[in-house]
Image (cartoon, rainbow, N blue to C red):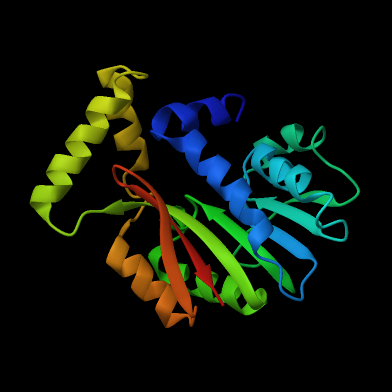
Amino acid sequence: AGDFDEHIAASIPLYAGLRAQVVALSRRFRSGGDYRRRCRMSTGPLLRRIRDHNLNARPSAHYVGIDLEPAFASSWEELSAPDLEFHCCDAREFEFDRVSLALSLFTVQFVPPPDKLGLLRRVRNGLVDGGALIVAEKTYAESGRLEDAIGGAFRSAKRAAFSDQQVLDKEEQLQGRMTLWTERELRDALREVEFREAERFWGSYQFLALVAVR
């Protein structure tokens, strides 16, 4: 938890650009609801950036960050505000209600396969009409050939920040803990839980981000 933000920034090329685009998009979705909730926020600085970015334009908005890992809690204290709160809990059990914007950044990929659709449906049902989910995920390519090409290029890029052994150790740690969809499967899942539309706005190697509207 202590170096989580730095680790993610080094692990995902163009991650800083994703965060900047999420902040910019956050002001675009507010339709009848005063709440912005993020499904998983780790140490919390992105949610604080979103809150600060919207403070003048959305003075009545309330921000809630949740994460399952208690080790992040020490980072939340300095970020909290009267309109910004954090909870250590499971998103699969969290009550989403009157949400104008929900964020799920690299979360669904760690949810057990039988629970993925249920979580997406839970978030969708908690959104106000016109509300949105921003979901970023690591994905598989549609073919083995493209998976080898894109995955190989990504691993080469990671060597700028990590040793070969660190890259290998990380891949072994994630085996059985991370289950990926293709972009098509992610879009199909969003459609199945009745999001009206979804558009891709960011991508880097095997990673992508979509904004889906209820």
Task: Classify the position of the N terminus by image quarter.
Answer: top right
Is residue 95 in view?
Answer: no
Q: Quadrant of residue 96?
A: bottom right
Residue 169, position as x, y percentages in the image: 32, 28
- Relative side of 70 to 56, left or right: left
Pick out the residue farthest to the right: 82
Residue 42, position as x, y percentages in the image: 62, 41
- Relative side of 94 to 164, left or right: right
- Residue at (68% x, 41% y) in the render: 70
Nearer to me, 165 or 156:
156
- Residue at (76% x, 38% y) in the render: 76
Nearer to me, 72 or 5:
5
When the figure is inspected, residue 89 is found, relative to residue 80, above or below; the finding is below
Residue 179, position as x, y percentages in the image: 34, 55
Residue 166, position as x, y percentages in the image: 33, 22
- Residue at (54% x, 73% y) in the render: 213
Task: Classify the position of the C terminus by image quarter.
Answer: bottom right
Q: Quadrant of residue 74?
A: top right
When the figure is inspected, residue 63 is found, relative to residue 52, above or below; the finding is below
When the figure is inspected, residue 77 is found, relative to residue 55, above or below; the finding is above
- Relative side of 52 to 193, left or right: right
Is residue 102 in view?
Answer: yes
- Residue at (35% x, 32% y) in the render: 170
In this rendering, the count of numbered labels is 0
- Relative side of 196 to 52, left or right: left
